[in-house]
Image (cartoon, rainbow, N blue to C red):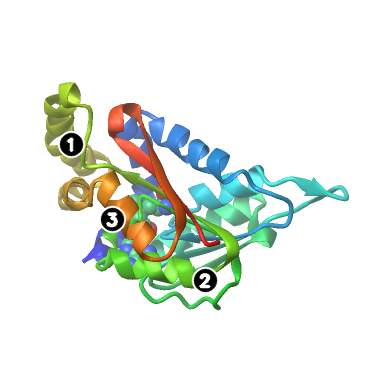
Amino acid sequence: MVRSVFNSVADQYDIMNDFMSAGVHRVWKDSLIHTLNPRANMQVLDVAGGTGDIAFRFLDNSPTANGKKTGHVTVLDINTEMLRVGQNRAEKLGYADRADFFCGDAMNLPVADHSQDAYTIAFGIRNVTRVDQAVEEAYRVLKPGGRFLVLEFSPVVTPILQKAYDTYSFNVIPKLGEIIAKDRESYQYLVESIRKFPDPEKFTNMISKAGFERASYRTMTAGIAAIHSGWKL
Ligand SMILES: C[S@@+](CC[C@H](N)C(=O)[O-])C[C@H]1O[C@@H](n2cnc3c(N)ncnc32)[C@H](O)[C@@H]1O
């Protein structure tokens, strides 16, 4: 079902994000990269990486060493249409030599144990059927000292905003999906999936249970989105 949702919206995905969030998704994604704080020669696995927003930000913010750009990212997604859009963008924008794109499932990563400096997943983990399995896989592929970072919508917003947020989510977003992406149902599913995702405290417990140390989170924009972090130590 998730595969067909993203097949249907892939070409309009980036423009829809700007419309739905009035551009704020860019600020949240910048915050994720700021939290990651890229070091020279870092190898990052961006799961559910879709059209490459996180991957390209990581590459833009990676330091140079000996006058050469460093940093390498592997973008993994279950959906080949999203990957196609991402790969085209990478070629157009000049990232192709530092980014690889692979089709794969977050619950069963085709990635070697202890091979990644960081694992990122933005607005993807709530779409995964078994979230705990995806978190365990993240732990497996990270090197000791590696960082796990999740950017996701949170189901809990500041109470004063709850009513307006619900109206916006359940009425305006599906309508925008209908007009812009010509697919109301997919955007209806996407807003419903936000409400089913565990709240930040519960998700933090899940991260700790998988073995990550110093599990923490911080919410942004009145609780609409959260960045979760854990370390494999
Ligand atoms: C909302 S998009 C996020 C894309 C990108 N990370 C961003 O922030 O713009 C969610 C992505 O998760 C992918 N996805 C869903 N389930 C997945 C799974 N089990 N394994 C890998 N990717 C998955 C979808 O194909 C889609 O590209």
Label 3, on which residue? Answer: 126
Q: Which mark is residue 141?
A: 2
> Residue at the spot x=33%, y=70% of the render?
133
Label 1, on which residue? Answer: 169
Compared across the picture, whether 141 is left or right of 39 comes to left
Residue 196 position within the rendered picture, expressed as x and y whole percent measured from the top left: 17, 52
Graded by Cα atoms within 10 Å as few (under 14), some (14 to 19) or many (20 or more), the crowding at tag 1 reads: some
* Quadrant where the N terminus is found in the figure: bottom left
Mark found first going from the N terminus, 3 or 1: 3
Q: Is residue 90 above or below residue 25?
A: below
Quick one: which residue is furthest to the top in this view?
160
Quick one: which residue is furthest to the right in this view?
66
Compared across the picture, whether 156 is left or right of 9 comes to left
Local secondary structure at mark 2: helix
Note whether residue 79 is visible: no
Mark found first going from the N terminus, 1 or 2: 2
> Residue at the spot x=16%, y=26% of the render?
159
Q: Amino acid at mark 2?
A: Val
Residue 65 position within the rendered picture, expressed as x and y whole percent measured from the top left: 82, 50
Local secondary structure at mark 3: helix
